[in-house]
Image: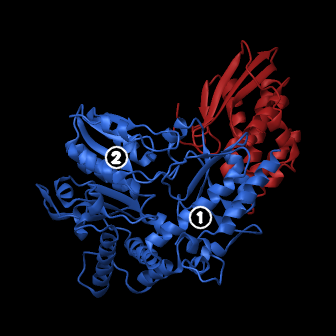
Chain colours: A red, B blue
Amino acid sequence: MMMNSKSLYQEVILDHNRKPRNYGVLDNPSHHAVGHNPLCGDRLDIALKIENDQISHIAFHGESCAICKASASMMTAAVKGKTRPDAETLIQEFRDMATGKLDPEQPNHLGRLTVFSGIRDLPTRVKCAILPWHTLHAALNALTSVSTESDDDPVQATSVSD
Amino acid sequence: MANAYASMTPGANTVFDVEKIRADFPILGIKVGDKPLVYLDNAASCQMPRQVIDQLVHYQTTQHANINRAVHYLSEVATMEYEKARRRIQQFVNAREDREIIFTSGTTESINLVMQGYGRKFIKAGDEIILTTLEHHSNIVPWQMLAEEKGAIIRVVPINDAGELDIAAYEKLFNERTKFVGLIHVSNALGTINPIKSMIAFAHQHGVPVLIDGAQAAPHRVVDVQDLDCDFYAFSAHKLCGPTGIGMLYGKSSWLEAMQPFKGGGDMIASVTFEKTTYAAIPHKFEAGTPPIAAAIGFGAAIDYLESIGIDDIAAYEHELLSYATERMAEIKGLRIIGTAAHKTAVLSFTLDGIHPHDIGTILNEDGVAVRTGHHCAQPVMERFKVPATSRASFAFYNTRSEVDALIAGIRNVQKVFL
């Protein structure tokens, strides 16, 4: 019951917030999407290149809280070099972990990303952690824009806002 | 007088006994994890004292039936109590007559009632509606819906860097097409108290009626609708220690009588046939269906409670808390207060350099400190100050200086986490 935010704001997350990996703009991406959370105004731009069936380059930028930025940073590091199906597996597992459907103790492919497992106890912050993954999913599936309030949203399905 | 309010040590000879007041609010005793609750989200919703809770229980256990219908005992008692609450609100805002007070579900519904009942009847294509940058979304969106439907135009009063309305710009907006003004009394995002009395007088010189969104004003200052001479005034019970789901709209009887009903149904009619329905007199014309009777009675009890303390004393005490909190916040490096109007209620919206408001809110919560983070349903205000969101501490008369200290310590903790 008790929110345990201090365990969420642990060093690895704070470090990715301070020094986000793959932060910036990518020239000539093959896939691109913008995600936003209209409830808090967060906005995330993700661009990537797929070459030889692998994500060879990925970059993100935008305005967001520390949880969202760290999640994006760790996500880009995790999916770089992965095939699209492998990336989709991670997306699914991360969403399931954040919404409490996947127990991080069970076998999974998330590795260090399990530092975000505490987010499931902070329902108001789940969307912050998921937004990058949601946006990556949209980019891989050639949707140019997603919202945490859209039909595709794993947390809350309402009308598409864009 | 100010010194008397400043000396609030328990046991001291004080004018405003905050510890005694706190004892009226059971919820203030809870803990968040192992930390005592420090509730600083009063602008979103205020807590309820035992006196109001008891009234709700008393009604539900001894007086409840549907109102305005049956001739039996309980129905008569319930109707009497419901109408007593209406008269209580009438006195609270000093309306001429009790029929000028309409029960609604809250400020939002009150504004929508005026939009539907007045706007849809009297606003036409090309007409102009004046709103301000400080408006809550609830006093923007209904008018946008109307403007879209009718082809009317919305004009917006700008604010300065302190978050105060530009009155000269307001006056320049008036022309022969101006048909309505919607004006927030106190900004929920910044705490700015607007000079509504002179603004209303100016609108009236141009024959334009004015609606006041008083959601953030009624809990903190004396509201006298006759003195203000506003045409409509709206607020919610839950922001002044009452229940959610109930609010009020004051309207001058001449307007209310001219307006069309907002909702059709039972209780709002004089007679119904399939050929023609005639509506009941005001206020019932606007109160279709069974209202939240217990909530309305709780609304009346909340006003009793506030007046037992005294609205002027509440305002003075909260002002002293605001001064103290503002002073303490000024000590924090990298903290920027958004909204520095000369006249403010006890609301402190702020940003911290390099730290997102949602992270601030989550970490403050760890210390038991409840603040609101986000755009506060006032995105035009956020845009004006070029911030996506702020953290907002909003104080009530039951907050203390030591709670201000807890907030300040919490903010320093947040900065430590992100060091």
Chain under numbered label 2: B
Q: Amino acid at mark 1?
A: Leu
Q: Nearer the viewer, residue A27 or B366?
A: B366
State the image coordinates of residue B213 (x, y, percent, origin top left): 38, 53
Q: Is B59 situated above or below A126?
A: below
Q: Nearer the viewer, residue B183 or B33?
A: B183
Q: Nearer the viewer, residue B407 or B315?
A: B315
Q: Residue at x 82, y 14 (%)?
A: A52
Query: On the picture, is A76 further left or further right than B227?
Result: right
Query: Could you say which disc has been placed on residue B240 in the image?
Result: none
Query: On the picture, is A143 further left or further right than B365?
Result: left
**Where does label 1 land, which residue?**
B321
Q: Residue at x 10, y 54 (%)?
A: B275
Could you tell which of marks 1 and 2 lies nearer the N-terminus?
2
State the image coordinates of residue A89 (x, y, percent, origin top left): 78, 34
* Residue A113 seen: no
Q: Residue at x 79, y 51 (%)?
A: A118
Query: Crowding near pointer 2: few (<14 within 10 Å), some, many (20+)?
Result: many
Chain under numbered label 1: B
In the rendered image, the quadrant that contains the C terminus of chain B is: top right
Q: Is A45 situated above or below B238?
A: above
**Residue at the limit of the structure toward the top, as seen here:** A28
Question: Do dots 1 and 2 share one subunit?
Answer: yes
Query: Could you say which disc has been placed on residue B182 in the image?
Result: 2
Q: Is B311 situated above or below A67?
A: below
State the image coordinates of residue B101 (x, y, percent, origin top left): 28, 65
Circle 2 SS class: strand
* Residue A12 seen: yes
Q: Amino acid at mark 2?
A: Gly
Q: Residue at x 37, y 36 (%)?
A: B169
Query: On the picture, is A114 further left or further right than B82?
Result: right
